[in-house]
Amino acid sequence: MIERILSIIFPNRCPYCDRIIKFGLTECEECFDELDKTPSISHTDAGITCISAFRYDSRVRRSILNYKFKGVSFNAKSYAKALCSAIEALGIEDDFDIITFVPLTKRRENERGFNQSRKVAEMVGEYFGKPCSALLEKTRNNKNQHDLNLQQRRENVKGVYGICKKADVGGMRILLIDDIVTTGNTMAECCNVLRTGGAENIICMSVATAVQDK
């Protein structure tokens, strides 16, 4: 009831076109019809395979930039719904036991107000009734990946992630979620850390992919 009242005073807007939407919707009906909801499977330069809900096109790109850098946290509902649909479409909902996410440093998380990947991951976990937990931590700040070339991106993520002190990933089947995958180096480094910690299997997913078809 409180959420409904707040939606009247501060109406939600479609993540993709900014139109005001009805209470209970996660995007406007037009964008829902027009967005390509076919899961995208990308084979990245870093050697990992990542499942994504969307292509990183103009509408989705603008939406994610607002989500990451302008604090439009409502967008997470649409992203999580799209990822859940992709998981069900591919029939992989029984292939993971726990969900985790690419971490941020405390400084970066404070700058943005929240960890955008965590918020989506928690909603996916709630939908499937599976735990979502911080298994990884970012131990130091590094340069922004989007400012670097391919080789620099690979070097930039080395050694910046570790297993959380209280986490035990031995034998776990993990769903790892991020917002965008481009070269895949961030995901690949996180996977390496989890495998070194004893993870049995890792499924990589992102809201959007900027990987070009080969």
Image (tube, rainbow, N blue to C red):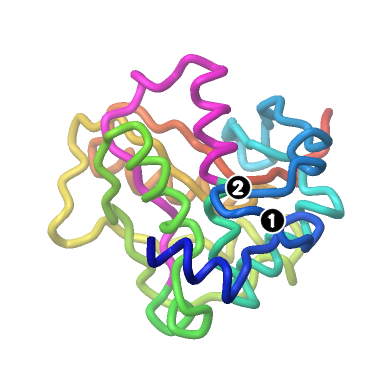
- Residue at the spot x=59%, y=50% of the render? 185
- Asked if the residues shown at circle 2 and circle 1 are in contact, with their CB atoms under 8 angstroms apart, the answer is yes
Measured as percent of width and height from the top left, residue 200 is found at 28, 27
What segment carries the magenta color?
A: 80-104
Vertical arrangement, residue 91 with respect to residue 177, above or below:
above
Measured as percent of width and height from the top left, residue 13 is found at 69, 62
Quadrant position of residue 119: bottom left
- Residue at the spot x=29%, y=47% of the render? 132
Callout 1 crowding tier (Cα within 10 Å): few <14, some 14–19, many ≥20: some
Quadrant position of residue 8: bottom right
- Residue at the spot x=73%, y=48% of the render? 28
Residue 80 horizontal side relative to residue 118, left or right: right
Task: Tell me the residue that label 1 is attached to.
Answer: 21
Callout 2 crowding tier (Cα within 10 Å): few <14, some 14–19, many ≥20: some
Residue 213 horizontal side relative to residue 68, left or right: right
How far apart are labels 2 and 1 at the CA level? 7 Å
Task: Tell me the residue that label 2 is attached to.
Answer: 25
User: What amino acid is at disc 1?
Assistant: Ile
Measured as percent of width and height from the top left, residue 26 is found at 60, 49
Q: Quadrant of the N terminus?
A: bottom left
- Residue at the spot x=33%, y=38% of the render? 195
102 magenta-colored: yes
Is residue 189 visible in the rendered image? The answer is: yes
139 magenta-colored: no
Vertical arrangement, residue 149 with respect to residue 96, above or below:
below
Measured as percent of width and height from the top left, residue 211 is found at 76, 41
- Of residues 20 and 201, the one drawn nearer to the viewer in this rendering: 20
